[in-house]
Image (cartoon, rainbow, N blue to C red):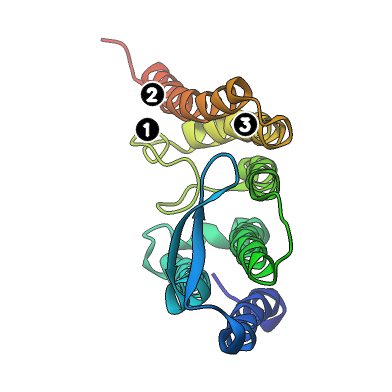
Amino acid sequence: MKSTWKLELPQLLVLALMFGLAAWTWPTAPDKVPVHWNLAGEVDRYGSRAEGLLILPGMALLIYVLLRALPRLDPRRENYARFAGSYTAMRLGILGLLFAIDGVMLLTLRGVAVDVGLVVGGLVGLLLVGLGMLLPRFQPNWFAGIRTPWTLSSDRVWQQTHALGGKLFVVMGLLVILAGLSKAPWVFGLAMGSVVLGSLGLVVYSYLLWRREQPTT
């Protein structure tokens, strides 16, 4: 998959901002930094300054490098050109989520009250909705999309599974957003259950589609 500065610049800017904000915050950051929150949005673990300020930028950089390299290793690398825009949008969405979570953490260090559950839940939900809109455009490959033995064995199974998967991801994303807004335990359970059942359902669905293609004896 060919890449251009036009496609890569937004992601590189996100990475630069994350490391720049870490460097700017470092001199005034406390020795112990909040690094994890529970479901109620309360801090339940603190880490060192390095862990708190650098782990998310480091993860973002690693993910960026990995997602840039994977298409070159894919035996079906030629297909990436057919969904290059969607693949780039997925990469940017993942980096954007990490940037936003990093921003929430930095705001808490500045004493700004942030409803972590609401913000992070909403952002994760939006990412799932975005992925749902992109999935039907993904073409068969080994690294991005709904990869089961059966979607990888049949292009038709791949397309039909991703068409359904796109709709399910939108529904799952909306439920995750609702869970963040409501804070009701049963809504959170419903959202997480939908993610698990939806994912398992797509695996079964791809198998059934593949079975239908097999010649009867």
Residue 211 appears in the rendering: yes
Q: Is residue 70 above or below residue 82?
A: below
Which amino acid, mark 3? Met
Residue 198 horizontal/vertical position (percent): 52, 26
Do the numbered discs 2 and 3 sit on residues whose CB atoms are within 8 Å?
no
User: Which residue in the structure is indicated by mark 3?
Assistant: 172
User: Which residue in the structure is indicated by mark 1?
Assistant: 150
Q: Which mark is residue 142?
A: none
Q: Is residue 21 above or below residue 123?
A: below
Query: What residue is drawn where x is 72% and y is 79%?
Result: 6
Q: Is residue 88 left or right of residue 147?
A: right
Tell me which label, 1 or 3, sits earlier in the chain: 1
Residue 176 horizontal/vertical position (percent): 64, 35
Graded by Cα atoms within 10 Å as few (under 14), some (14 to 19) or many (20 or more), the crowding at tag 3 reads many
Tell me which label, 2 or 1, sits earlier in the chain: 1
Tell me which label, 2 or 3, sits earlier in the chain: 3
Looking at the image, the residue that sits furthest to the left is 217
Looking at the image, the residue that sits furthest to the top is 217
